[in-house]
Image (spheres, rainbow, N blue to C red):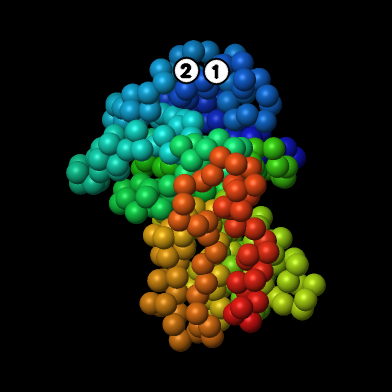
């Protein structure tokens, strides 16, 4: 294990994959430009090390980037493409949803389409609603796509490596506010399984399910509640599709209460799927209604104070837990 930032862990995963397999290449808008000299940026130093044949700056066209990825995957390469901001994935959605997600199914499983999409997400940058809209529920809704959403450096590296060498198209969501957070991550080719959640804090009285930076919000709330004598379990989903349903159900059956937290807006968010899962398969264990803590159903504001209001905080999570317990 080595200590570093979330961004450095992603860089390590890309470096490892490029070194392991010559079929791997990285492409996207500005993946090789000077801004990535910051060692915490995911593609820092890769152009100098592997050259423009393996690290490709692309035109400003998400549709073209995704078309490149689909074609390359169909020809047996292992493309890793970057979409600079999450809302821009709508421009790439035809190739991603109508082609990448369906081609293996249409082949009867005889062909593989190992395509990885790294997409940057997150708020707190005053980038406005056109750059700050989380759309992970859209992607998780699409059959044929896998969706990973790491919360820490170890998972950032392990899940990305698994995605690159998975025979299916995988979207890995990277929250930019996490790029500068630190933690331990493995050296070399160490992969984290796609579709397996992890209990990051054990508890007895309520389960809080989260992913991405919302995991840190949930942990902060759990720490505050512990000082009041409440024992809260925090489950990091790590992967939204496939979803680790057994981990969710096991924790809910243990605690009898469930709060789901995410930074995307509430209506039709992933929290609704988790709530439905608990209601359908663990209703007999629930001691209280399921609560969702999420962003309001408005575009993400540009104003910093309004942006902070838009994102669920530890206080909101704690209040939801206390309302159940």
Observer able to see residue 164: no
| Residue ID at (42%, 77%) | 279
| Residue ID at (55%, 30%) | 14
The correct choice, above or below, for 75 with respect to 53 in the image is: below
| Coordinates of residue 303 in the picture (x, y in percent) | 60, 41
Q: Could you tell me which secondary element the residue under label 2 belongs to?
A: strand
| Coordinates of residue 234 in the picture (x, y in percent) | 63, 65
Residue wearing tag 1: 32
Q: Residues within 10 Å of mark 2 (few under 14, many from 20)?
A: some
Q: Residues within 10 Å of mark 1 (few under 14, many from 20)?
A: many
Query: Which quarter shows the C terminus?
Result: bottom right
- Image mark for residue 15: none
Residue wearing tag 2: 57
| Residue ID at (33%, 24%) | 64
| Residue ID at (47%, 22%) | 29
Q: Are marks 2 and 1 in contact (CB under 8 Å)?
A: yes
Q: Could you tell me which secondary element the residue under label 1 belongs to?
A: loop
| Coordinates of residue 90 in the picture (x, y in percent) | 36, 38
| Coordinates of residue 275 in the picture (x, y in percent) | 45, 70
Mark 2 or 1, nearer chain start: 1
The correct choice, above or below, for 322 with respect to 17 in the image is: below
Q: Quadrant of residue 43?
A: top right
Foreground residue among 311 and 114: 311
């Amino acid at each position: 294990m080595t200590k570093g930032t979330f961004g450095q862990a992603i860089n390590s995963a890309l470096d490892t994959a490029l070194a392991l397999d010559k079929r791997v290449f990285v492409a996207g808008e500005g993946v090789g430009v000077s801004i990535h000299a910051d060692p915490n940026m995911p593609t820092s130093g890769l152009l100098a090390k592997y050259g423009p044949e393996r690290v490709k700056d692309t035109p400003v066209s998400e549709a073209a980037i995704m078309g490149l990825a689909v074609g390359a995957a169909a020809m047996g390469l292992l493309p890793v493409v970057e979409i600079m901001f999450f809302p821009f994935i709508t421009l790439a959605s035809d190739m991603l949803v109508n082609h990448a997600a369906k081609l293996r199914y249409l082949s009867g499983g005889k062909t593989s389409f190992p395509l990885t999409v790294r997409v940057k997400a997150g708020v707190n940058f005053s980038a406005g609603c056109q750059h700050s809209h989380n759309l992970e529920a859209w992607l998780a809704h699409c059959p044929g796509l896998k969706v990973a959403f790491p919360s820490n450096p170890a998972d950032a590296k392990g899940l990305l490596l698994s995605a690159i060498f998975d025979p299916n198209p995988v979207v890995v969501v990277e929250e930019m506010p996490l790029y500068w957070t630190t933690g331990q991550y493995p050296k070399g080719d160490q992969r984290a399984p796609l579709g397996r959640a992890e209990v990051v804090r054990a508890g007895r009285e309520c389960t809080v399910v989260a992913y991405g930076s919302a995991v840190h919000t949930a942990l902060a709330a759990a720490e505050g509640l512990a000082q009041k004598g409440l024992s809260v379990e925090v489950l990091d989903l790590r992967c939204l599709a496939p979803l680790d349903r057994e981990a969710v159900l096991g924790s809910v059956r243990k605690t009898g209460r469930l709060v789901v937290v995410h930074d995307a807006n509430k209506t039709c968010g992933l929290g609704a799927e988790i709530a439905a899962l608990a209601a359908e398969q663990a209703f007999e264990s629930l001691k209280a209604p399921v609560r969702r803590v999420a962003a309001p159903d408005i575009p993400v504001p540009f104003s910093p104070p309004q942006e902070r209001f838009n994102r669920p905080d530890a206080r909101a999570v704690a209040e939801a837990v206390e309302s159940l317990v």
